[in-house]
Amino acid sequence: MNDKDRRIVIGSDHAAFQMKEKIKSFLEEQGLTVEDVGPGSESSVDYPDFGKRVAAAVSSGEFSRGILMCGTGLGMSMVANRFPHVRAALCGDLFAARMSREHNDANILVMGGRVIGDVLAMAVVKTWLETPFEGGRHSLRLEKFDTIHPAS
């Protein structure tokens, strides 16, 4: 991991606030610098507001990776994948986390705070962070992402 990869941006909604706090501590214990874009409590919030913050930071290149969480992970995935150069992957198991990196070079990990427990979430994060992108034929496929336009 280079210095830029040692920094990660993280956000959630109220439903996954507790998971975000645990994952943030876990990441810091791993020596990563964490930029927490919120929320700061379990008070009800609109998940798109926090999804946009993380996705914009990754899309712009300010951060190479981010983590998002909401109740199911579905809403955050939908928000994040609207941004250019973002490949957000909803992962609820270790195989999905590994494949999202190896084959898809996912740069945002998304999880559902009401779907997976804390122990599995930590293992998913660890797997996702440690798995490198395979490149090769997968690079050619990913290049097509930025050329997809609904009208074509």
Image (cartoon, helix red, strand yellow):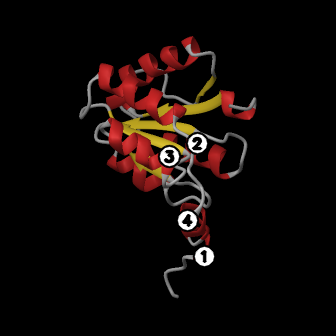
Q: Badge 1 is on which residue?
A: 147
Residue toward you, 107 or 56: 107
Answer with the quarter of the image where residue 17 lies.
top left
Q: Which labelled disc corresponds to residue 101?
A: 3
Q: Is residue 66 above or below residue 77?
A: above
Residue 1: x and y in percent read 68, 31
Residue at mark 4 to residue at mark 1: CA–CA distance: 17 Å
Residue 66 in view here: yes
Q: SS for tag 1?
A: helix
Do callouts 4 and 1 mark residues in contact (Cβ within 8 Å)? no
Q: Badge 2 is on which residue?
A: 53
Q: Is residue 21 above or below residue 9?
A: above
Relative side of 145 to 48, left or right: right
* Amino acid type indicated by mark 3: Arg
Q: Earlier in the sequence, mark 3 or mark 1?
A: 3
Q: Residues within 10 Å of mark 2 (few under 14, many from 20)?
A: some
Residue at mark 2 to residue at mark 3: CA–CA distance: 22 Å
Residue at mark 4 to residue at mark 2: CA–CA distance: 31 Å
Q: Residue at x 44, y 48 (%)?
A: 100
